[in-house]
Amino acid sequence: MASSIVGESGHLYVQGEVLQRHREDPKLIIFKAESENEPFVFKRVPRPFYDLSLRLAAEFAGSRRLRMHIDCNQEEGILAIQELHSKDWIHIDVKPDNILVNWTCDKDGNITVTDVALGNFDIAFKSEGGKPRQTPYPIGNAMWRSPEGQTGRGVTKASDIFSFGLVCIYTLGGGELLLLDDYQELVRRGISPEQEIISRHFAYFGPVTEGLLEQVNSEHWCNALKGVSAMAEDAVEKQPSLKFEHWGKELGPTAQNLISGMTNPDPTVRITIDQVLTYPWWQETD
């Protein structure tokens, strides 16, 4: 499967060709199409996002671990956050929907994942000199953001690591602890989804830290984080089993230690992607 991008003009860019695509529903942005009997998945995006994709494709030419606007992935099976981070790019939107897999299924129903790639670089950011990204609004998907990502301030490579840690929990069967399933109830109680999510994360992984506050570096957001953290600590005091150190035991000690390192609320001490990929757990799961 290859991926392509549709620009504002409504044209489909596939392997240098421009194909006209007529769509019945203009609100849809992701499509499946065919060109010469070969299937494609493509996404309609504004011109700046397409230009960003071209820049990324040029910088990571030949990569089999990243799904750019045109690529193939037939051999590699390693998630490519390491490749991005090695060149000071931050993905900012690491979540299950953006991790693409090829898989096979045998006659007994056993599924084997053969290829894995990271896709969707619409909000990827080049961190010049390691400087964090600062925006006036949260960036990335609310469900998978790091604590600093919820503020839009101090977003670094460590923010991708936190999101990847959540993805690992989800993949290992902990989705019900991460996903919100009753938005209407939250609205009725006057709680925003973002507040509920970050409160859960502080309860699971630990309270707000000085490292996090210093990286966010905003009086408004620091006060907000402290307030949510205090509520989370109250919840943990009443229900200690909320902490990841309790329910994470089901994953086994190696996986639990790895994920704890990725989901530390303090971005200044989270483990790096290089440390993630050299962790013994990956050998245990081969």
Image (cartoon, grey):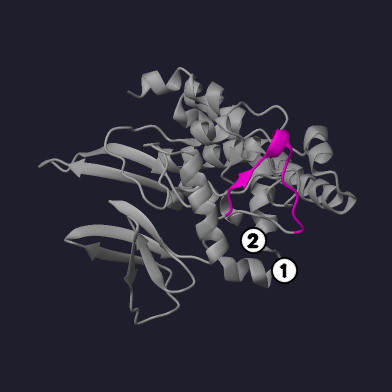
Q: Secondary structure at mark 2?
A: helix
The part of the image, by quadrant, that contains residue 234 is top right
Query: Which residue is the site of mark 2?
Result: 193
**Residue 135 part of the magenta segment:** yes
Question: What's the residue type where badge 1 is placed?
Answer: Gly
- Crowd around label 1: few <14 · some 14–19 · many ≥20 (10 Å): few
In the picture, measured across the screen, residue 278 lies left or right of residue 286, that is: right
Residue under the point 58% across and 36% down: 161
The part of the image, by quadrant, that contains residue 274 is top right
Residue under the point 82% across and 46% down: 226
In the picture, measured across the screen, residue 221 lies left or right of residue 65, that is: right
The count of marks equals 2
**Of 237 and 86, the residue lying toward us:** 86
Query: Could you say which disc has been placed on residue 190 in the image?
Result: 1
| Residue reaching furthest to the right | 219
Residue 266 in sight from this viewpoint:
no
* Image vertical order of residue 154 relative to residue 37, above or below: above
Give the quadrant of the C terminus. Answer: top left
Residue 161 in sight from this viewpoint:
yes
Question: What's the residue type where badge 2 is placed?
Answer: Pro
The alpha-carbon separation of the residues under discs 1 and 2 comes to: 10 Å
SS assignment for the magenta stretch, majority: loop
Where does the image place residue 24, in percent across and percent down from the top left? 34, 82
Query: Could you say which disc has been placed on residue 34 in the image?
Result: none
Where does the image place residue 211, in percent across and percent down from the top left? 79, 33
In the picture, measured across the screen, residue 117 lies left or right of residue 165, that is: left
Where does the image place residue 177, in percent across and percent down from the top left? 53, 47
Residue under the point 72% across and 52% down: 152
Q: Nearer the viewer, mark 1 or mark 2?
A: 2
Span highlighted in magenta in the image: 123-136
